[in-house]
Amino acid sequence: MSPLDALGLAPMAPDMERVETALRGSVLSSDPFLSDVAGHLISAGGKRLRPALALCSAYAAKGVGPVSDDAITGGVSVELVHLGSLYHDDVIDEAETRRGVPSVNARWSNIVAILAGDYLLARASSLAASLGADVAALLAATIGELCRGQVLELQHLFDADRSVNAYTSAIEGKTAALFATACRVGGMVSAVDDPTLDALTDFGHHLGMCFQIVDDVLDVTGTDESLGKPAGNDILEGVYTLPVIHAMGSSGSGSSSEELRELLGRKIDREQLETARALVTAGDAVDQSIETARGHAADASAVLASTSALDAEVVDGLTRLVDTLVTRQF
């Protein structure tokens, strides 16, 4: 079951079609080349989780039914921020594929990818501004958080002593912030009260943390085919995520922890990468990481359960989404 299927909300499909149409239209330019580059990853598809969360917040506030045009615009704006960050990430990672297609930097160049990513962020900002100063300010702050998280991650490249706290702070910025904003925007355009708005934001934060931790586990345990990108690329690029941090710091794994520490901390080749992945999965590091993800999933569900102002049908759907994201396997 896909994450969006787990929601089980009848209006979601036509509303997501509205998002898709608006998303494609939002990147059109008088320059056909720019339109082609900016729409490259949109055409490749994707989970569209962030706009779906914006829609769900609108449903939760107003009841299940077609959302307003403002909710669609809010969903498109957060997805454009996500896509722009992917263009930049692929340059940083020197990635060759994304979502099963050549990355923009691989197909064209790093310069084109950076400028196209900037264009997507500019379009996102323009759409947010059309929803009011509060939404525009929120999106600007969120883009800043994405940058902060990414910069913090870059400071710890090939750092065998990267701490859990440093990892947590990085993913709060680069992933959870945009999930939280997606939920908050849906509530803002639906004029919910402040306590409900804060609850939706907290839910998005915990869901984003859960999502990123599971993603990082899958990077260690998955395959190129299942991920749509090279498996183990984080380790190869020196980004040591939660399962790797646990594996290197676990006294219970004995010599495998020391072997992993001796292997990492520098550039490795593909053969060494497979050794590293085997060492990470040999002990309980993956289980420890999944347990952390489950903690955030529980917190997300608890926020929903304790917020009486939210539509019950939507709460049930979002709870199913939480369960699907924390247990997903590819």
Image (cartoon, rainbow, N blue to C red):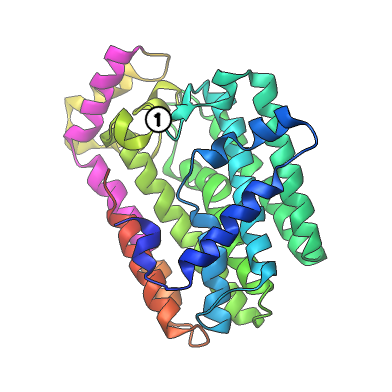
Query: x, y (%) of residue 152?
Result: 58, 36
| 23, 110: nearer the viewer | 23
Q: Is residue 58 above or below residue 72?
A: below
Residue at image position (25%, 41%) is 285
Residue 145 counted in the magenta span: no
Query: In screen coordinates, is 220 left or right of 234?
Result: left
Using the rendered view, name the quadrant where residue 256 is placed. Answer: top left
Q: Which residue is mark 1?
A: 229
Query: x, y (%) of residue 59?
Result: 53, 76
Query: In screen coordinates, is 98 left or right of 285?
Result: right
Within 10 Å of disc 1 (Cα), the crowding (few <14, some 14-19, many 20+) is: many
Using the rendered view, name the quadrant where residue 117 is placed. Answer: top right
Report the magenta stretch's main SS: helix
Q: Quadrant of the C terminus?
A: top left
Residue 294 counted in the magenta span: yes
Residue at image position (54%, 40%) is 43
Q: Is any part of residue 90 visible from this angle?
A: yes
Q: Is residue 145 above or below residue 59?
A: above
Q: Which residues are magenta?
A: 269-297
Q: Please, what is the three-letter code of the amino acid marked with disc 1?
A: Lys
Circle 1 sits in a helix, a strand or a loop, which is it?
Answer: loop
Query: In screen coordinates, is 225 left or right of 236?
Result: left
Q: Quadrant of the N terminus?
A: bottom left
Query: x, y (%) of residue 160?
Result: 40, 26
Query: x, y (%) of residue 108?
Result: 62, 19
Furthest residue to the bottom? 308
Residue at image position (74%, 63%) is 135
Q: Is any part of residue 53 visible from this angle?
A: no
